[in-house]
Image: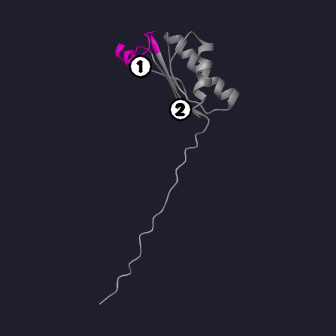
Amino acid sequence: MGILNERPLELNRVIEESVPGKQVTIAHVIAAPVTDIYERLGIDDMGAIGILTLSPYETAIIAADIATKAANVEIGFLDRFTGSVVIAGDVQSVETALQAVCDTLCDLMEFTTVQVTKT
């Protein structure tokens, strides 16, 4: 008759920590959004929507400031807790604003940025 070696299960604890880098992860223009998108976002239909996601999250405040000074766009949404910014304006203004954000954060603050994309 054998004796079973009964050991308590060993639990490994893993601590996950979010350490965001200095980066722009999305810079996208929706050139001709359907009306439903504007309604769901609760913003006025101005022609185009620009979307940014950034880290650290507080950079959303800086990005919104850069965007509104670079082109004739309005802030549709800004969340400093998730790093999300939505801007609205005509297509060219939104593209110009997003490019200004990416260029400024890259050149001035040494962020890693992405190419501004458009659909």
Say whether residue 119 is left or right of residue 113.
left
The amino acid at mark 2 is Phe
* Magenta stretch contains residue 5: no
The amino acid at mark 1 is Leu
* Magenta stretch contains residue 47: yes
Residue ID at (50%, 56%): 14
Q: Which residues are magenta?
A: 31-48
Circle 1 is placed at which residue position?
Answer: 41
Front residue of 110/84: it is 84
- x, y (%) of residue 108? 70, 27
- x, y (%) of residue 58? 59, 30
Specify the label residue 98 is tagged with.
none
Local SS, label 1: helix
Q: Which residue is farthest left? A: 1
Front residue of 59/96: it is 59
Comes first in the chain, label 1 or label 2: 1
Q: Vertically, is 9 above or below 89?
A: below
Q: Vertically, is 109 above or below 65?
A: below
Say whether residue 17 is left or right of residue 41.
right
Local SS, label 2: loop
Circle 2 is placed at which residue position?
Answer: 81
Residue ID at (56%, 9%): 72
- Mark 2 crowd level (few <14, some 14–19, many ≥20, 10 Å Cα): few
Residue ID at (53%, 11%): 92
